[in-house]
Image (cartoon, rainbow, N blue to C red):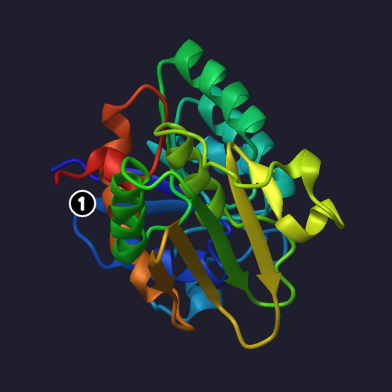
Amino acid sequence: MNKLKICVAGATGWAGSELSRGIFGVNDMELVAAVSRRFAGKTLSEVLGIEKLTSPIFGTVEEALSTNPDVFVEYTKPEVAKSHVLSALRGGAHVVIGTSGMSSEDYDKVNKVAEEVNRGVLAVGNFALTVVLLQKFAEMAARYIPEWEIIEYAHADKKDVPSGTARELANRLSNVREARLAVPLSEIDGPIESRGARLQGTQVHSIRLPGYVISIDAIFGMPDQKLILRHESGSSAVPYVNGALLAIREVGKLVGVHRGLDSVMKF
C-alpha cells in the first residue's frame, strides 16, 4: 500500500503536535516534513520525544515542499496561512486548512489557484465531531427559525476574531438565508459595536477571556421559545485528530475549495 506523504506546517504547535503524533500512529500515512521556524534543522523526534518520528523540520514552506508531499496541512497563523496554502498548491500538493482567521476573500483567491492547478483544498474551522454536528443542526434550524446570533468564546490571547469555527458557521448559515433583525443596525440607539459584527448575514460576538479554551453558541429565537446549540472544547487537542486524519485522506478526491469536514462525511 502506498502511503500518503504528509507535510504539516505548525507541526510543533498545540494542535499540530497532536496531529503529528496521530499521523505517526496510522499505517496509511507518512509524515515526510514539518514546518516550524523555531525548531528548523531538528527532527520531530527531538522536539516531540517520539523516538522513531524522524521527520525533518524546515524553517519555510518552500523548503518543506522539496519532499514532494501529497497533502500539505496548514496549522500555523492566519497572517501567513494564505501564502502557505498558495505555495503548497503551486508545489503540487492538496491542502487541508486547520488555521482559523482566513477571510472569504482569502478563500476566493485560494479557490481560483486550486482550480487552476487541479488540486483540492479542505478548509475546516474545527475538526471536532461535535462541531460538525452543531453546524448541521444549525443549518437545519435556520430553515425554520429566521432570527439567530452566534457567540464564540476563546482564551484571552487568541488574536483572530471571529474564530475559524464561527466564520465557518456564519458561512454555512448564509447559504440558508440571512438572519433577520427586529431592529435594523441603522436604527440602533447606541454604539453599533455592541451588536457584534455582521458576518455574512449573521451577528457574531467574540469573547476573549482567561478561563476559556474554545466554545461557540448558536442561538435561535422565536416568540416565547429559544434554541441554544453549544460546543465546548476541553484543554487538549486530542478531539481534533481523527477529523484531521479524515480530511487528509479525503482531500485528494476534491478540486477547489470545500469548507467543512461534513463535505467529506456521510450523514
User: In the orientation shown, which residue stands out farthest toward the bottom?
Assistant: 211
- For the residue pair 54 and 65, the one nearer the viewer reads as 65
The residue shown at (34%, 45%) is: 139
Q: In this view, does 182 lie above or below 19?
A: above
Which quadrant of the figure has residue 227?
A: bottom left
User: Which quarter of the rendering shows the N terminus?
Assistant: top left
Mark 1 crowd level (few <14, some 14–19, many ≥20, 10 Å Cα): few
Q: Name the residue under label 1.
A: 28
Left or right position of 5 against 39: left
Left or right position of 185 against 142: right
Q: Is residue 48 above or below residue 72?
A: below
- For the residue pair 26 and 240, the one nearer the viewer reads as 240
The residue shown at (48%, 52%) is: 125
Which quadrant of the figure has residue 244?
A: bottom left
Residue 6: x and y in percent read 40, 47
Determine whether the residue tagged by mark 1 lies in a helix, strand or loop.
loop
Residue 252: x and y in percent read 30, 32
- For the residue pair 226 and 119, the one nearer the viewer reads as 226
- For the residue pair 233 and 62, the one nearer the viewer reads as 233
Amino acid type assigned to the residue bearing label 1 in the image = Asp
The residue shown at (62%, 22%) is: 109
Residue 216: x and y in percent read 50, 66
